Amino acid sequence: MNPPRPESRDAQIRPCRPGDEPALYEVCLKTGNGGTDGTGLFSDAGWLGHRFVGPYLALEPALSWALEDSQGVCGYVLATADSERFARRFANEWMPRVSGELDRIRSNIPEPRSGTEAEQRDWFAHPVWFFPEPRSVYPSHLHIDLLSRVQGRGYGRRMVGLMLDILAGRGSPGVHLGMHPLNLRARQFYASLGFQELAVENETLYLGRRLSHVT
């Protein structure tokens, strides 16, 4: 029988702050295997964090929100209003900041720990972004990760709702996200929030939600 999941006291949704980066990278790693712990797949948290967390904190601070409970940071929701502009800024502003560190990681740990880590290394060598069509309808994107101790307690719904409201307030007509197609729990969660399937690309399922009638 599995041990009981440690419970968390009430958590607070708040804007990300300077100094949050290590804890947020850890959340990214702990959810980096299709929503489960990816620690065994990666030799360094930077392979996920520098792609899925750091650039949002640096380039979209107003769209970077954390979840924190009595045990510390336990989740986040991150977004950008303009995905294509974000991809350009990622290449021109973010990559120069982290390329040296990624090169050092490669030198210190030349062999990837797993095929998943190899894929992330390859992506950083040749970043390729996918934008589901119609791009003009779903120009924004978001992603959210929560540690297991705060899952199933309504925080994810509240955090996504908060971000949808913010993006709608900025005039975005719609938002998309990518997820592992076999993560059925996540798929049901997003469906309950009005997200619909848009495309499947490179083993990633893309879902979209129009923002003209955010509730």
Image: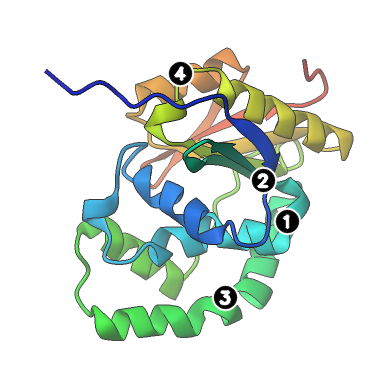
- Disc number at residue 152? 4
Label 4, label 1: how far apart the Cα atoms are: 27 Å
- Residue for badge 2: 79
What's the CA distance linking mark 2 and mark 1?
7 Å
Q: Residue at x 73, y 47 (%)?
A: 63
Image spot of residue 134 (x, y percent):
68, 38
Measure the C-alpha gap from mark 2 to mark 3: 18 Å
Q: Residue furthest left?
A: 1
Between 134 and 68, the one nearer to me in the picture: 68
- Three-letter residue code for mark 2: Ala
Please tell me whether mark 3 sits on a helix, a strand or a loop: helix
Real-space CA distance between mark 3 and mark 1, rounded to the nearest whole angstrom: 15 Å
Say the numbered circle drawn on residue 95.
3
Look at the numbered disc 2 and give the secondary structure of its residue: strand
Left/right of residue 116 with respect to residue 177 in the rendered view: left
On the rendered image, what quadrant is the N terminus found in? top left
The residue beneath circle 1 is 60
Check if mark 4's residue and mark 2's residue have beta carbons within 8 Å. Answer: no
Sequence-wise, which precedes: disc 3 or disc 4? 3
